[in-house]
Amino acid sequence: MPRVTTRIEDHIAHVTLTRADKMNAVDDEMIEAIIAAGQEVAASDARVVVLSGEGKGFCAGIDIGGLSGMLGQDVEALIMPRTHGKGTTNKWQEVSMVWHRLEIPVIAALHGVVYGAGMQLALGADIRIAAPDTKLAVMEMKWGIVPDMGGMVLLPRLVRSDVLRRLTYTAAPVAAAQAERWGLVTELADDPQAAALELANVIAGKGPNAVRAAKRLIGYAESGASDVDVLDAESREQAALLGKPEQMEVIAAEFGKRPAVFK
């Protein structure tokens, strides 16, 4: 069985972790499959992604067998080369960053456990919808290591420093309601998969160029750019949209009280 399946329907990419018998624990094969899925989606006509996991949990974290297999090797030679993301990441970091880097929105539907590598994968999404009984953890300290799969790029953008430190130092799981209060989770839903799909359909119905521009602009605004540069970026993105065929179709659909149709 493949570790990950990808299905694109109505411009929505459904990407599913399928190692349910192991709680979708991340081994080398799944790492490669997750990265390949991100690359496949990037090359597709998808306008939004729903990322989920089969079985009882979204992802239980790294497969500890794979971690122990690194012992005795030249670890620095394994993890220091920048092999992915145009020379910015190693393969473990690319698991989350391939989704963060996508030009289209990514929605993670979370349930069961979201631990360690699974937590960092979920952080690569734009939006996280969790079932009320979901447990989330920055689990790496349990094994005497630090988050190293993009977590230290993505976590500080979501939570306060004291929350980040508590999560990282303790490796303690937190309930979804607490995670929502802290900013790790966007919202709670009894059926996160259905809620994610409903939201994905809304996004897929918006102007695809405008949505991509919005994601670029938000990312730039969050990057620490100066106010002057962000204001300039706003204007440049807007100039590329105003009066163009896509926007004209959005306006016509709005006044015609019908769904917009994009080429």
Image (tube, helix red, strand yellow):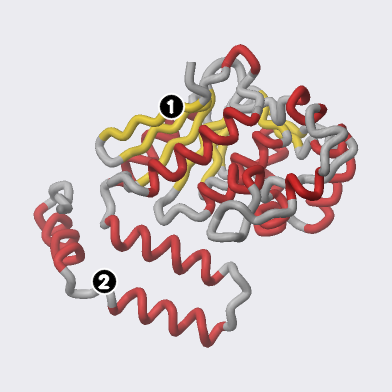
Q: Residue furthest bottom?
A: 228
| Residue plotted at (66% across, 31% down) | 114
Three-letter residue code for mark 2: Leu
* Mark 2 in CB contact with mark 1 (< 8 angstroms): no
Would you name the residue on which mark 2 appears?
241
Residue marked by disc 1: 5
Q: Is residue 68 left or right of residue 259?
A: right
Q: Quadrant of residue 202?
A: top left
Asked which secondary structure carries label 2, the reply is loop
* Residue 115 in sight in this render: yes
In the figure, is residue 223 to the left or right of 204? right
Left or right of 245 in this view: 191: right
- Residue 177 x %, y %: 68, 35
The residue under the point 74% across, 53% down is 80
Number of other residues with Cα within 10 Å of mark 2, as a class: few under 14, some 14 to 19, many 20 or more: some
Residue at the (19%, 59%) spot, across then down: 250
Q: Position of residue 46 (x, y in %)?
A: 32, 44
Q: Is residue 172 left or right of residue 155?
A: right
Is residue 158 visible from the viewing direction of this image? no
- Image: 8 above or below 164: above
**Of the residues shown, which amino acid type is indicated by label 1?**
Thr
Rendered view: 7 above or below 99: above
Q: Secondary structure at mark 1?
A: strand
